[in-house]
Structures are given as C-alpha cells and as structure tokens.
Image (cartoon, rainbow, N blue to C red):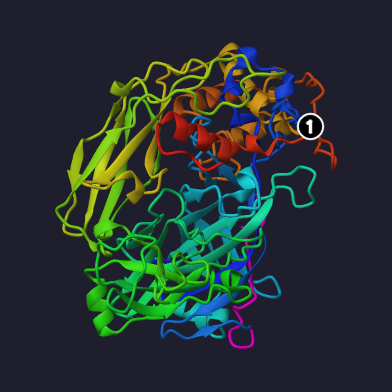
C-alpha cells in the first residue's frame, strides 16, 4: 500500500530547487551560436539565461519536521509527548553535497527527478533515527494552476513518489517510538516516500528565491507494487488538469484487510496561498456512486451516492498535519459496493450549481474515479538508451483497484513534434539556432504495439533504440515520447503528461587516446550551460580542466546516482563519458598555471528587473508541448 499504508509518518517544511535555467532554451546547447549574454539574468523582454542562470542544480529539504504518526490500528499521534518521532527533522544525507534536480532533456522538461538524494530522520540531538537512499524517479501529476493567485511555475504543483532503499535504523529509538517500531516491523529494508511540492518562489529579488513548500508521507513498501505511482483507485477530472471544483488527478487505495480507504489529496486541492491552505469549496465528502454513469458536476442523493466520510480539509494546518492523506473506515457493505462502482468526492456549498434546490442539499460530484475504474501506469517513465541498446519498462493495470489480468495495453509513438524547448522568438538577444524537431526518425525506436498483462495485472516491454543519426545536430541523440493506455481509455482518463520519455543517444566511436579537439566541444557545452561551475573550473578552457584533472576524473567516474556525478543534467551518453575519462586518464598534473577562472557571483537582491513570469521554464515548456501536440488548450 506504499505511503498510503495505515502505518506511516507525515512531514512538512520547505524545499530548495536551485536549478540552472540557461538550459531551459534548447538553442543554448548550440556551441556555434552561443552568446555570453545567455548566462545573464533575464532583463525585461530579453530572456538571456532566464530567471536563474547561476543555479547549482541543488535539491534539498529545508526545515522539514514530522507532523504526524499513523498507526496500524487506525489511531494517530500529533504530539511529541505521545510519540517522540513527532517533531523530528527530515533532511538530506549529512557530510555530502546536496542532491540534484534533473530534467531528461531541454526538449522534454516534464520529467524532473532528484538524483543522489539521501533522506534522514533525526532526533532532537541530531542522532539519526533512520536513513535511506532515494531511488531516482521523475515527478508526476504536474499541474500549473494549483495556486491561482501566482503566475507561471509559482502556481504549479507536483508529486515525487519513490522508495528509500538501504534503510538503516537506530535500534535505541525503536524502543521509545511506537511509529518507528511499527514501520521497522512492517518494512525494515525499504520505505515508500511521497513528496508534494508547490509554492515555488522563482523571483530572484525575493528572500525565498528557489524555495517552496513540501509535504511528505513515508510508509510501507510492499513486494510487487510499483515504486513511483499508486496502482489503485484513480480520480480524474472531466476536463484535463482540474475539475470544475478545482480538484486535480489523485490516487487512492482501498485496503480490504484494514477496511480503510486512503485518499492522497496532497497534490489535488486548489490552494489559496504558497503554504498550502486549501481553497474553500464547501463541505467535501467521499463516497461511492451507485450508478457508474453519473459524471462530474452532477447532483447526487441517497439513491445514487453512499457517503463514507466528510474530509476536514478546512481545518487549520490540515494539509501539513496529514501530508494530504485522508483515511476513512468502510463497512462490509461499502467494500462490496466499492469493488464494482466508482468512488467520488462530492461537495455541498452555497456555490454549488442549483444550490437553491437543484441538488436537494446532498451535493454535486466534484470529481470521480476514472470510467470503469480503469488505471494503467508505467515505470520508469524515463529511459536513457545508448544506441544501439534497449531499456525495460514495467506496466501495471487495475480496475477498481484490483489487478486487471489478461488485458491488452497499447503502445504507440507520439511522432514528430516541432518547436519544443524554445524561448523568446524575437527581440534583443534572441538565439539564432534552429529549434530541432523531436520524435524522428521514428524507425530508430522499437516498441511493441501491445502487450497483455499477467494474472497480477502486470507486463513488461522492451524499448529498443538504434542510432538516430544526430537528427538534432547540436544535441546528442533524439527524444521520443511513447503513449500507453488500455483499450477505450480517452485523453481525459489519463494525465496529459503520462508518457514514457526516451532519450536515445547517438552511437559514438571511442578512441583509446582522445585529443582535446575531441573533448573540447563536449565540455564547452557544459561551460556554456552551467556558469556556476566557473568558480571551480572553466570547462571550456584546456588549462583550467587540466588543473582540476583529479576532481573531474572523480566527477565523471562516479555512478549516475551519486550527487557528485557529471554532467549535472545526466544527459551525457556512456560513450562520450568514456571519451572524457580516457582523456583525463592520459593527463598528468599540468605545471602551467591555469588561466584565471571567471566566477559568476550570486545576484544581488533587486538586480534582475522586469521579469516576465510567463517565461518560466516548466509552464512555458508545457504550454508549447500542448499546442504542438494538438491537445486541448493548456491553461495559462
């Protein structure tokens, strides 16, 4: 049951995502046309290096504390006097650099993932209570209007779900904390974790620049369940991104053993401020629709809706205290009905359509479970393939939360898409490089047309990548998008960004003793895109690179999961990485002093002026993708 298991802890605080934005415009990857101004902050209608060109890529927790303990018997604790785990700190791994938040490619910016993230729970004296390593998975359920009062990326919200592996425990504290003891007994080696992030501050003049709000839940990871999504009950809006009541996609689990229904509303409810106060949509109740044909924005009554419980989302601090998870007990009759009928949230308020008598006071469907209770999810949703090569993806299907056996899952390439990952189209300092198309040549990607699930509702497919032949000229390889769905599932039944993104890297010849002429174009691209590194090494200068040989050899040799791994975006093919490593191995320490390293200082408050919020990275990219892919209008 993952982080929705009855045994779980919740936490809340802030996060930092100090991403570099020079790489938000794909045209900045073209060494031949790159201009120094692309490393400067945006000024008015001149995008330059966008809103954070000096970003380090760091992703970290800031001031996060455990807010609640939820036990197997359904009881809870919210005070350290009842369980000493309440109030403990949730932070990153000590004694190492921060994790990195990474996109797959400038032409697919909708799959950001933390790399090298350690998660540590600490007591009042700093002692570790438990710790684990976060398996890198891309975020999901991204939407761009959760905070309507904000603009661009500051209005956005998303969830990161994964597993903490290699979990270690402080046995001394297991004797004093009931919740830690129950977690350890149920899932000692690995834990499920979900982060919901929102309220990001992308204003360089703000004291909270690069900070946002995070709420989390940590629970039991069971055998056979996916790491990065819930294969359970899936709530979907009638029109993409959010329902008429401002509720977005979310998942739920109905556990017949504990008779508990758990809803994850951490990323679902529209909020009124960056801290996560839910917008008031009236009384909000969860229940079961007796008639599966009832749709969103339809009135219900006792004959059509079985109420389970009211959700106290309007209580002060509810989102942070619960991690956005609401649980309710079900009767045997409820369990039987829910096994074959959809779940729904119903709202009753003076603002309901027909409140003067049309709904008879029983409420309106605010959002409901997917048609026929169908759900399909893939993992991983990001593949990096060095051509010629292949990657594996597992797929899980369910109907009303139960495994959907012997059912066909369909796959197809989205095809060629133009114009992805650009920025300004005219005006001063507009990049001159052409924006390449993605998704072609299609023959370079091999996918099955369909695959049948087994008795457990799962299947695996292989995606093959042949050498695409450098179709994007100044970028390595090609990005492909793979759509997957069950027969009969429409676009609105699935999140608009539920796709498998594949980066197929170009095949390269690896010389045993490469020269600087071969290495320089690769390193120059990183010197252009990450000016923050120039405080340590100028990647485009041979003497500077030689002077930092040992440091770079380490950075290019550690596993991708290491926070010190280079490149920062994890977009370097294995072949090109080996070319760089071979060149570094051939070097000896240079006796010649390197050229002076140009440093890029942090901006003084107020230095960038006239920021255009509509230029923010993910919001702009997603709008461009929706338009190019001929999907319904994207909400600005």
Position of residue 112 relative to residue 511, above or below, is: below
Q: In which quadrant is the N terminus drawn?
A: bottom left
Q: Position of residue 303 (x, y in %)?
A: 27, 77
**Residue 570 visible in the current orientation:** no
The residue depicted at 33 percent of the width and 36 percent of the height is: 482
Q: Position of residue 448 (x, y in %)?
A: 22, 35
**Residue 35 visible in the current orientation:** yes
Depth order, front residue of 8/163: 8
In the rendered structure, which segment of residues is drawn in magenta? 80-97
Question: What is the crowding at mark 1: few (fewer than 14 residues within 10 Å), some, or many (at least 20)?
Answer: some
Helix, strand or loop for disc 1: loop
Q: Position of residue 107 (x, y in %)?
A: 50, 30
The residue depicted at 34 percent of the width and 71 percent of the height is: 300
Kindly report the secondary structure that dominates the magenta region of the rendered protein.
loop
- Membership of 95 in magenta stretch: yes
The residue to which callout 1 is attached is: 600
Count of numbered badges drawn on the protein:
1
Depth order, front residue of 158/459: 158
Depth order, front residue of 71/178: 71
Which residue is situated farthest in the front direction here? 356
Task: Choose top left, top right, bottom left or bottom right for residue 397.
Answer: bottom left
Which residue is situated farthest in the bottom direction here? 82
Residue 373 lies left or right of residue 438; in this view the side is left
Q: In which quadrant is the C terminus drawn?
A: top right
Position of residue 574 relative to residue 209, above or below, is: above
- Membership of 228 in magenta stretch: no
Residue 551 lies left or right of residue 283; in this view the side is right
The residue depicted at 20 percent of the width and 59 percent of the height is: 456
Q: Position of residue 313 (x, y in %)?
A: 54, 73
Task: Choose top left, top right, bottom left or bottom right for residue 440.
Answer: top left
């Amino acid at each position: 049951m993952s982080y929705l298991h009855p045994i779980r802890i919740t936490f809340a605080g802030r996060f930092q995502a100090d991403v570099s934005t020079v790489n938000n415009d794909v045209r900045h990857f073209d060494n031949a046309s790159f201009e120094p101004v692309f490393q400067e902050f945006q000024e008015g209608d001149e995008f330059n290096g966008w809103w954070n060109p000096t970003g380090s890529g760091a992703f970290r927790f800031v001031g996060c504390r455990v807010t609640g303990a939820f036990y197997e018997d359904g009881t809870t604790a919210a005070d350290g006097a009842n369980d000493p785990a309440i109030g403990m700190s949730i932070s990153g791994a000590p004694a190492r650099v921060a994790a990195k938040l990474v996109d797959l490619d400038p032409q697919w910016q909708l799959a950001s993932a933390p790399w090298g993230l350690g998660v540590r729970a600490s007591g009042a004296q700093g002692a570790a209570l438990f710790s684990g390593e976060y398996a890198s998975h891309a975020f999901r359920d991204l939407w761009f209007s959760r905070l309507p009062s904000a603009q661009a990326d500051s209005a956005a919200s998303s969830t990161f779900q994964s597993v903490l592996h290699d979990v270690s425990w402080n046995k001394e504290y297991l004797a004093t904390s009931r919740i830690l003891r129950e977690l350890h007994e149920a899932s000692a080696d690995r834990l499920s974790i979900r982060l919901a992030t929102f309220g990001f501050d992308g204003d360089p003049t703000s004291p909270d620049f690069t900070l946002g709000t995070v709420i989390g839940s940590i629970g039991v990871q069971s055998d056979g369940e996916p790491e990065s999504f819930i294969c359970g009950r899936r709530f979907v809006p009638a029109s993409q991104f959010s329902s008429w009541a401002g509720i977005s996609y979310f998942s739920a689990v109905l556990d017949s053993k504990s008779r508990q229904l758990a809803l994850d509303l951490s990323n679902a409810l529209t909020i009124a401020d960056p801290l996560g106060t839910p917008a008031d949509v009236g009384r909000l109740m969860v229940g079961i629709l007796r008639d599966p044909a009832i749709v969103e924005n339809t009135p219900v009554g006792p004959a059509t809706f079985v109420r389970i419980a009211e959700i106290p989302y309007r209580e002060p601090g509810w989102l942070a205290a619960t991690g956005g998870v609401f649980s309710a007990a079900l009767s045997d009759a409820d369990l039987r009905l829910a096994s074959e009928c959809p779940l729904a949230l119903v709202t009753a308020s003076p603002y309901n359509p027909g409140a003067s008598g049309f709904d008879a006071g029983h409420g309106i469907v605010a959002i409901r479970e997917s048609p026929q209770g169908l759900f399909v999810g893939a993992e991983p949703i990001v593949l990096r393939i060095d051509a010629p090569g292949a990657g594996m993806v597992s797929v899980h299907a369910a109907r009303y939360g139960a495994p959907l056996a012997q059912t066909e899952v369909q796959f197809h390439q989205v095809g060629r898409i133009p114009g992805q990952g650009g920025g300004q189209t005219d005006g001063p300092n507009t990049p001159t490089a052409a924006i390449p198309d993605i998704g072609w040549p299609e023959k370079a990607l091999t996918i099955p047309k369909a695959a049948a699930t087994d008795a457990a509702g799962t299947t695996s497919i292989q995606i093959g990548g042949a050498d695409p032949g450098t179709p994007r000229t100044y970028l390595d390889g090609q990005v492909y998008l793979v759509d997957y769905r069950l027969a009969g599932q429409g676009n609105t039944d699935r999140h608009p960004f539920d796709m498998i993104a594949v980066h197929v890297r170009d095949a390269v010849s690896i010389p045993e003793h490469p020269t600087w002429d071969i290495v320089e174009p690769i390193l120059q691209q990183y010197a252009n895109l990450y000016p923050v590194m120039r405080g340590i090494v100028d990647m485009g200068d041979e003497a500077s690179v030689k002077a930092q040989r040992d440091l770079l050899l380490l950075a290019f040799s550690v596993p991708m999961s290491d926070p010190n791994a280079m490149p920062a975006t994890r977009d370097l093919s294995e072949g090109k990485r080996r070319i760089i490593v071979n060149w570094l191995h051939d070097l000896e320490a240079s006796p010649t002093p390197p050229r002076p390293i140009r440093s890029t200082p942090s901006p003084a408050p107020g230095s960038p002026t006239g920021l255009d919020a509509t230029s923010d990275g993910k919001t702009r990219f997603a709008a461009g993708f929706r338009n190019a892919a001929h999907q319904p209008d994207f909400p600005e």
